[in-house]
Amino acid sequence: MKLTVLGARGSMAVSEKGRARFGGATSCYMVQAGDDCVFLDAGSGLLSAPVHFPKPPLILLSHLHLDHVLGLGMYARLLLEGEKTVICIPAENDETARAQLNGLFSPPYWPVALEDYRGDVEIRCAVTPMQAGSIRIESISGNHPSGCRVYKLSCGEKSLVYATDYEHDEASFDRLTEFAAGTDLLLYDGQYDEEEYLRSKGFGHSTPNMGIELMERCKAKHLLLVHHSPFALDAQLLLRQGLIDRSNVSFAQEGEVLSL
Ligand SMILES: [Zn+2]
Ligand SMILES: [Zn+2]
């Protein structure tokens, strides 16, 4: 499998100076295995994604907070006649999934529903375990205001776990440790530094140190910290990275490609 970081910023897209290295686009990760493609979330990073694929891609949403869905409205693939794209949402059923996404992408918030774009757009609820070609998808619930799914994508012997918008808590931590056991790549919400976290408890995000604790407990091979604060400058993220000083822990950079 190959993972491309299309957007690693959390909460709000940013374009101010001093953030170009880690990037300003919000959550979107492209996972490819041969001809199969799964997008994890559809933040503004989705705008940099390719539009043509050998097989229809699956867009898998962790939850519907705006920073994880806003890229959908301007993703050019959805305008290509006859091209199929499936969008899967954590919801009780397909009807609820469609109502939730169409509720956001419809007047007065957006001019046209995604299902009315020229492309063949299908909105479904995410039922796991499921298969996207050769990619197996499993999920558990995380800990985040109004909920968020943690996904595991596996292909052959390799796996990655996507734990964005997750706040460390004892109740879900054991479940997450077991779910992520031995994974090759752990994407984890490292939005806050320790001081910011004290001010932001209950907002649904964690710190790099919490990610390292999980990594050590579940014996993940690499920790990729994601969902960077919109306020964090490149210099601050580089400083945090330097203090951690481990070759298998890094902050995700927009445009970066990791092979498993
Ligand atoms: Zn978010
Ligand atoms: Zn969120």
Image (cartoon, rainbow, N blue to C red):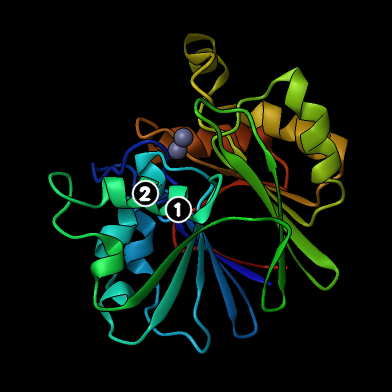
Q: Secondary structure at mark 1?
A: helix
- In the rendered image, the quadrant that contains the C terminus is bottom right
10 Å crowding of disc 1: few (<14), some (14-19), many (20+): few
The residue shown at (24%, 59%) is 113
**Do callouts 1 and 2 mark residues in contact (Cβ within 8 Å)?**
yes
Asked if one can make out residue 162 in the rendered structure from this viewpoint, the answer is no
Q: Amino acid at mark 1?
A: Glu
Q: Residue at x 73, y 58 (%)?
A: 129
User: Badge 2: how crowded within 10 Å, few (<14), some, or many (20+)?
Assistant: few
Give residue 95's mark.
1
Q: Nearer the viewer, residue 90 or 55?
A: 90
Name above or below for residue 160 compared with residue 32. Answer: above
What residue sits 35% from the left and 30% below the top? 231
Q: Where in the figure is residue 20, as x and y percent of width and height?
A: 34, 51
Report, in whole angstroms, how far the alpha carbon at label 1 lies from the one at label 2.
Answer: 6 Å
As shown in the figure, which amino acid type bears the numbered disc 2? Ala
Residue wearing tag 2: 99
**Residue 127 visible in the shown view:** yes
Q: Looking at this rendering, what residue extends furthest in the top direction?
A: 199
Q: Is residue 205 above or below residue 54?
A: above
In this image, 112 relative to 39: left or right? left
Q: Which mark is residue 252?
A: none
239 relative position to 182: left or right: left
